Amino acid sequence: MSTVSDFEAALEAKGLVKTYKRVRAVQDVSIVLRRGRVTALVGESGSGKSTVAKLLARLVEPTSGEILLDGEKVRRVREYRRKVQMVFQDPFASLNPIHTIRYHLTRPLKIHKRPDTVEELLERVNLPADFAARYPHELSGGQRQRVAIARALAAHPEVLLADEPVSMLDVSIRLGVLNLLLDLKERLKLAVLYITHDIASARYFADETFVMYGGQIVEGGESESVTQRPAHPYTQLLIESAPDPERSVLALDAPLEEVAQISTGCQFAARCPKVQERCWTQAPPRTEVDSYGHWAACWLYAEAAA
Ligand SMILES: Nc1ncnc2c1ncn2[C@@H]1O[C@H](COP(=O)(O)OP(=O)(O)OP(=O)(O)O)[C@@H](O)[C@H]1O
């Protein structure tokens, strides 16, 4: 069995914190994206996933923490932005209706001085060459998202940050777009961050899965292990409610804005069926729950390990 460290780190975030006034959107998030691997960041609305993506894309500055690309701090934002590209949730908002697909794809090729042709980019995302002459409104949501991916690829990135890339697409075409990302990961050895609220899709699509709650990552490891043997009480609840989004665990509780301000301990304490005294005041350390790198930040396991 291959282990996580067999794959070279491309992007590494250490102790990221982002505070908006009194809201701690992201608290002490550390994550490594590796070449040739898809890493899922799973959580409900408001858990801080998009803020992590924006921090990693350097669209917002962290309150504290650091980001390393190929092991180094990259001061030149332009160089960083070339290597780390983002694909957004809404393929309708991301393309300008007055310009053709050729225009959308030519621009990044020029900016990044790449020799590729528009037709090559289209082929890379399995679209026919004659799509270059079309306008965005002539394309379906899935086709637009492929164009958005092609545009990101024009820069020859090392890292692709995909924030809910299929959640606005018809269910019937989601798989095709996810399979394209998998194919690109393999062929181009991209490090892909896949942000989603759908933990079931993480099992299928991601090699590694991290679960986020209240601005913190509470569990992580190989996707198979995290989704089939969830250790953190929050992940367990998330998986139980997964087949029925209407029964989202979020509906049971206080707004996350409030949660994120409460404690110095575990963010999940107020909702946890297994809460203990210390959970309110002491942040639980990351503790391994198997020998393959699956960990949970939960006192249930920290005690057993000690
Ligand atoms: N620019 C901002 N100003 C103030 N608060 C913000 C800002 N951006 C995010 N937040 C707050 O930070 C927290 C995390 O938001 P974020 O958008 O990262 O969550 P998310 O998990 O991506 O949710 P969603 O899936 O709904 O986008 C929320 O409480 C949100 O209200």
Image (spheres, grey):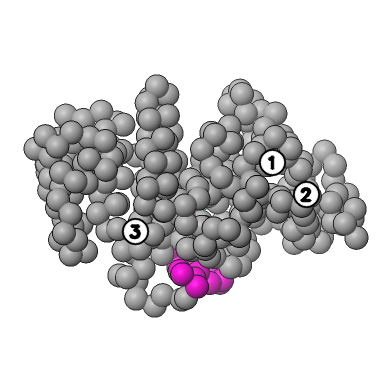
Magenta range is 60-71
Q: Which residue has dot 2 on it?
A: 290
Tell me whether the residue at label 2 lies in contact with that at label 1, contact meaning CB atoms closer than 8 angstroms: yes
Vertical order, 237 against 284 (above or below): above
Instruction: Identify which amino acid the numbered label 1 is placed on.
Output: Ser
Residue drawn at x 84%, y 51% is 301
| Residue lying furthest front | 1
* Of 267 and 108, the residue lying toward us: 108
- The answer to whether mark 3 is within 8 Å of ligand 1 is no
Image location of residue 225, percent across then percent down: 69, 41
Where disc 3 sits, the SS reads: loop
Q: CA distance from mark 3 to mark 1?
A: 29 Å
Instruction: Identify the residue under disc 3.
Output: 157
Q: Earlier in the sequence, mark 3 or mark 1?
A: 3
Q: How many angstroms separate mark 3 from mark 2 (CA)?
A: 33 Å
Residue 32 visible to an observer of this rendering: yes
Task: Using the rendered view, name the quadrant where residue 24 is placed.
Answer: bottom right
Ligand 1 has an atom within 8 Å of the beta carbon of the residue at disc 1:
no
Q: Is residue 120 left or right of residue 241?
A: left
Q: Which mark is residue 151?
A: none
Mark positioned earlier in the residue sequence (3 or 2): 3
- Residue 116 placed where, x, y %? 17, 54
- Residue type, mark 3 in image: Pro
Q: Which residue is mark 1?
A: 225
